[in-house]
Structures are given as C-alpha cells and as structure tokens.
Image (cartoon, coloured by chain):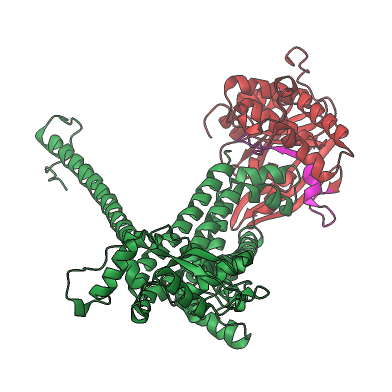
C-alpha cells in the first residue's frame, strides 16, 4: 500500500533527535561499545548494520535505557534526546521508554487481548482520560501500524493468536500507542517470512513521517531498502556513518567495504 | 567399545559390514534394555500401589459399616426432664429399654444382653432425645451401635468353632446375638459416624470429625501464612534482590530448609511456639504455624521456578512500553506464573496434610473427644489420628486405622486433582 507513495530515499529534515558522544558500554569486563559518537536525525530511518556481536543492539538499547535491567552493564558517555541527557538523575527510565518506543526481534505480544496489548502503554502512563479516548488511541495506533483492517472485528481476541507478521505489527502498534518521539527496532523482521517482512518494511517507511526510526538489521538489502542513514558497527566501534546510498556505493572505510561485499560478518 | 582396526581411518565405510551390523545390533539391544528397565520400574511402582490400596481397602472396608441393634426405648418424663433433656437419667432409661425389648429375660440374661449394646448407647439415645424432645413420654425403636466384639462377630471376624475359652464371646453370647439376628434387629448400615463423630474410647463410636476439622484449620493457617509470605519472598529474591553473595547464601539456605526433616521443625515449634510464646498445646493454629515452616520453602522454590519460566520477552515487552519494575512483575510476570505457583502451593499443602512428626511434638496426638470449634482448641489432625488409632488395642480400631488412611488419601487425591485442574485451567501459551 505504502509502496505507492514511498517517500524518496532522501533525508527530509536535519533536526538532530539523538546525539551520542563518547559512549562506552561494559558488560562486566567486556568492553562492548567503544567511543561511539553519533547524531540521529528526526523523521529519518537510521539503520545500524554490522556483524553479529558488534554492539549495534547494545547501543540501540542504550537509547531507551533497556540496559539498565542488566546488572553487569555499565554505561559511560553522554546520550542526549532533544538536548536532554537521558542518563541524568532527573530522567526516569520508565517515562523515557514511553518517549522512545521499542520493537523487539521476536514478536512478543502480551498474552492478552489485542485491545489490551495496545492500550497497556497509554493506560499505565495515564494518556487517556476515559474509555472513549483510549478506544481512539487504540484505533489510531492500529491504523498507523497497518493492522486495523485485519483486527478491527476481533479486538478482544488474544494477540498471541495472530500470525507472526500481524503480531509484529501489533507490537509496533503497542510501541507507538504512547506517542513516542522515536521508535527503536531490534531486528524486527528476523523472525518473519518475506511477505510479512515486506509489510513491516512498508510500515517503517510510513512511520518515519512521524517518528525518528532506528532499525538494527542483519540484512543489508533491508538497510538499503528502508533507511536514509546507515551506521556500520564493527567490534564495538562505530566505523562509518552516513547517507545509506553512500555507505553502500562508496564506503570510506575498508572494513565497511569488506562487510557489505560479504567478506566479514 | 568396538575394536578399532589399526591404521589410519578410512573414508570409505562399508555400512553393510559385519562390524557395523554388530554395532547397530548392540545399540538396539541397549535401547531395548533401557526401555525394559523403565517399564519394569513403572510396573513395580504400580504393583506396590495396588498392594497398598488393596491392603487398605480390604482392611478398612469393614470400618465403613457398623453393626446396629434396634431396641425399644421407653422414654419416661420422670427420667428425662422435658425442660432439660440433656441431663436425663439415661442409664436407667437403657435398663428399662432392655426390659421392654426382652420382657422374658431374667436379670442375669439381661446383663449379658446389655453387653451387646455399645457402652455409649445411652449417649446415642440422649442425642436422639435432645434433637427431638417430643419423644419424651413415648416408646421409640432406636438403632444403637453394638459393642465392638459383636460388631466383629457380625462381620464374620470371629471363628465360632474355636475354643470357647479363648474367645471374648462365649456360646451363650453368640446364641443371644443369633436370636437378635433372627428377630431382624441387627442391621449393618453405612457408618457415617466415622465422618460425623469425633474420637472415642469405643471403636464403634470413634470418628474422624475432630481430625478432619483439626487438619482443615491447620492447613488454613498454614496456607494463610505460607502463601503470601512465600510468594512475597520469591518475588523479592527473583525479581528485585541484587545478585550477590548474600542472596546466594539465602538461596542455598532456602533449598536446604526444604530438605530439613520435619521432626526438626516440630522440635523448633515446641521450643519456640509452645516454650517461648506460650501458645496452647495441641492447637491446630500452632500446628498450622509449624506446617507453614515446612511449606514455606516449598512454595518459595516453586514460585521462583514459575517466575523464572516466564519468558524474558514478556518482561522486555512491558519494560519497552515504559512499565515500572513493579508493574512488570504484578501486571505480567505474576499472572503468567500463577498456575505454577498454585500447583506448587497445593503440592506443598498436600505434603503438610500428611505430615505427622511435627504435630506429634506439639501435642496434636491428644485424645480429644470433641471436634475443635476454633483453631485454638485442642484437636488432632488426620495423620496423628491414624497414629493414635494404630496404637489402640481394640479390634475395631484396626479396620478404622485403614479407613482413616483411606480418608486421608482421599483428601490428598482431591488436592492433587485441584492442582491439575488449576494448572490446565490457567495455563497460557505465549
């Protein structure tokens, strides 16, 4: 559907959403992220690519402080969301995660109804004053996630009964129901079949009209298809970051070139 | 191990060669032997269970019926005051009853006939009159239990051809009983008294009511203490506690506590609950406290296992939309873990129901002839009642011991059935 009006693969806005400086992450003794500096733009899809274990997921999880729940993880440096340090004491990770939504590798709907899945976030953050408002948020989120037409007649059925691709779109609907400013996606298509992957990719392209989207992916084709900016991670360092077209056609760093031509990874 | 041929291993294997076929045959044999052992083990277990149940049922079945004899009881207003029927002169009532029932018997025969009735027959009559005071002034036919030797005789447990001197009943007693049988006065109804009476010195009257209520009170107290405490402790340890040396020590100790012999908990309860706190002896409340000491580690371990089994993706999903730790635990993890927690709890309570040793130490093996009306009254529990009856010399208690074990097993099977039902009812897939 969205294929028709796919936005040109160009960066629409230059407003910086996330600015990371000198970010270091340790898991116990392991130095997982080294000196990462990156500026992620608003209303843009940014792809993180790199071989397994290169730290791209770890860095993604720093942006909404999901690493906080890992006792051995230690984070240094500075990550600013709209100029605000997200690791500042005054920032509550619980609220941060409502502003920075996340979609995981494996579709993980709650074993509750479709409606409850989507309304959970708005409910716990008190975003709706009454049932009608909640209904509206649920419908809008499901429409934005391109799932409304498929589930509008069975909102009370369990979300776990949907197909894999539908489940993942349900998780996207759940993530955008709190009206986040950013959406982080950790390999959102790796558990999906090609058709469902196509649907989710169209959806991502559509979502960037409203959000800044960061997507971690193993598939370079996917990065090339959906993103405007690409960051290549290798062994915990950010090797190269730039326009997707340029990364894939004229990589500056020999490691990037080796990776995209299939020699490392 | 097979003999390895010398030389370097070759790449061209002849899968049909003697060596490979032998190897295959040996592996198959191993498989068959393993399966055979498994089947044998299960068969043996079933055999043992069958023997146990057969012994209990064949020994205990008789206790589910009780011989009764019908007598005519004239209840005169002179002996029983209608205003206060509980305080009547029932001893005399019973003597009159014998006279009315057997008008032709002389005094010595009457005394022998009186032996057929349970010593507690007068209390049976009294309870009837208390329930229905309009009987006063009438002559009523009442079924009263026979005493134990006649009960055994009626159930065919007395060899009437054996030496008269070695029997409790001589030939005249047996002849008198035969006559009653011929008159149609002897019946063998279902022995509801086994469930509705409390303990008694007389086996024909002894029942499990006190023990069942005592056990129920003790389990209730045990549940009310160990369920919230156990879940709370497990949630804290599993979800909130920092993982360090201290939490490791606590974890190891909880696992050890689950393996401590129950008699040790009994001694602890004796010293602490009865000794220091001066709680009442033989009370189901203290029994429940003691049992909760044992159930608590079981519930903590089961709850932690159930919490661990909730997939991390659910926690991440909830954290990802901005749920706080507490919202994640109580809104998502705990409901998903509930079937496992409930199963573990019921298994723990079923264990507690069958526990004897700690209850003996806090005096729940007392001889109590009234059912407890509160958890603080002296009472027995089912296992301790079995213990008491197994110790009693009267013939009637032998069958009652087996019957009590069957009742206890019945309750255990019921609890396990509830556990299975809850597990299948609330189990959710993700």
Work out whether residue B5 or residue B224 is closer to the camera in this orientation and state it: B224
* Letter of the red chain: A
Residue B40: image x %, image y %?
A: 24, 50
Q: Quadrant of the N terminus of chain A?
A: top right
Residue B351 visible in the current orientation: no
Q: Which residues are magenta?
A: A85-112
Name the residue at 60% across, 76% down.
Answer: B80
* Letter of the green chain: B
* Outermost top residue: A4
Name the residue at 58% across, 21% down.
Answer: A194
Q: Is residue B299 above or below residue B419?
A: below
Residue B390: image x %, image y %?
A: 37, 73
Work out whether residue B349 or residue B89 is closer to the camera in this orientation and state it: B89
Residue B205: image x %, image y %?
A: 45, 70
- Tell me if B58 is positioned left or right of A6 in this view: left
Q: Is residue B377 above or below residue B139?
A: below
Residue B359: image x %, image y %?
A: 49, 76
In the image, residue B46 lies in the stretch drawn in magenta: no
């Amino acid at each position: 559907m969205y294929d028709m009006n796919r936005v040109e693969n160009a960066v629409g806005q230059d407003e910086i959403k996330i600015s990371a400086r000198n970010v270091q992450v340790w898991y116990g003794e392991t130095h997982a992220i080294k000196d990462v500096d990156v500026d992620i733009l608003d209303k843009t899809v940014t792809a993180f690519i790199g071989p397994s274990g290169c730290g791209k997921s770890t860095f993604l999880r720093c942006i909404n402080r999901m690493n906080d729940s890992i006792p051995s993880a230690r984070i240094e440096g500075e990550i600013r969301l709209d100029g605000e340090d997200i690791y500042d004491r005054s920032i509550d990770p619980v609220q941060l995660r409502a502003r920075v939504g996340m979609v995981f590798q494996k579709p993980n709907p709650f074993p509750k109804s479709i409606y409850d899945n989507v309304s959970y976030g708005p409910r716990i953050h008190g975003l709706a004053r009454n049932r009608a408002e909640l209904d509206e948020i649920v419908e809008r989120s499901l429409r934005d996630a391109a799932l409304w037409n498929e589930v509008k007649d069975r909102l009370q059925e369990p979300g776990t009964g949907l197909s894999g691709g539908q489940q993942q779109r349900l998780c996207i609907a759940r993530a955008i129901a709190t009206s986040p400013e950013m959406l982080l996606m950790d390999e959102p298509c790796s558990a999906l079949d090609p058709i469902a992957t196509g649907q989710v990719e169209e959806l991502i392209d559509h979502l960037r009209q409203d959000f800044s989207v960061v997507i971690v992916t193993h598939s370079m084709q996917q990065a090339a298809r959906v993103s405007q900016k690409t960051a290549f991670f290798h062994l915990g360092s950010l090797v190269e970051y730039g326009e997707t077209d340029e990364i894939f056609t004229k990589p500056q760093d020999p490691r990037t070139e080796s990776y995209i031509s299939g020699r490392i990874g | 191990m097979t003999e390895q041929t010398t030389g370097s291993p070759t790449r061209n294997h002849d899968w049909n060669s003697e060596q490979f076929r032998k190897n295959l045959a040996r592996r198959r044999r191993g498989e068959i032997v393993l399966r055979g052992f498994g089947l044998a083990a299960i068969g043996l277990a079933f055999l043992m269970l069958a023997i146990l149940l057969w012994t209990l049922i064949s020994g205990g079945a008789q206790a589910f019926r009780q011989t009764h004899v019908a007598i005519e009881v004239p209840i005169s207003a002179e002996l029983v005051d209608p205003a206060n029927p509980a305080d009547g002169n029932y001893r005399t009532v019973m003597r009159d009853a014998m006279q009315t029932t057997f008008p032709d018997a002389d005094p010595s025969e009457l005394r022998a006939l009186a032996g057929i009735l349970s010593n507690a027959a007068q209390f049976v009559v009294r309870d009837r009159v208390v329930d229905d005071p309009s009987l006063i002034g009438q002559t009523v036919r009442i079924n009263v239990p026979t005493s134990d030797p006649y009960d055994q005789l009626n159930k065919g447990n007395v060899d009437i051809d054996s030496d008269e001197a070695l029997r409790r009943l001589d030939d005249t007693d047996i002849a008198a009983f035969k006559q009653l049988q011929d008159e149609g006065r002897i019946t063998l109804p279902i022995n509801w008294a086994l469930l509705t009476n409390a303990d008694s010195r007389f086996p024909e009257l002894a029942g499990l009511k006190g023990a069942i209520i005592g056990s129920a009170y003790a389990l209730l107290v045990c549940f009310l203490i160990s369920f919230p405490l156990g879940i709370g402790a497990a949630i804290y340890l599993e979800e909130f506690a920092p993982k360090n040396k201290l939490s490791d020590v606590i974890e190891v100790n909880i696992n050890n506590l689950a393996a401590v012999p129950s008699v040790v908990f009994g001694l602890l309860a004796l010293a602490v609950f009865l000794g220091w706190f001066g709680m009442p002896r033989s009370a189901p409340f203290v029994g429940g406290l003691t049992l909760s000491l044992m159930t608590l580690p079981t519930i903590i371990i089961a709850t932690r296992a159930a919490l661990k089994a909730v997939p991390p993706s659910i926690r991440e999903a909830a954290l990802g939309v901005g749920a706080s730790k507490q919202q994640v635990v109580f809104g998502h993890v705990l409901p998903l873990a509930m079937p496992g927690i409930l199963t573990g709890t019921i298994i723990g309570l079923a264990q507690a129901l069958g526990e004897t040793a700690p209850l003996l130490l806090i005096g729940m093996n007392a001889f109590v002839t009234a059912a407890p009306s509160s958890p603080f009254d002296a009472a027995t529990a089912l296992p301790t009642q079995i213990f008491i009856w197994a110790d009693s010399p009267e013939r009637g208690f032998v069958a009652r011991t087996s019957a009590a074990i069957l009742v206890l097993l019945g309750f255990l099977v019921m609890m396990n059935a509830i556990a299975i039902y809850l597990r299948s009812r609330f189990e959710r897939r993700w």
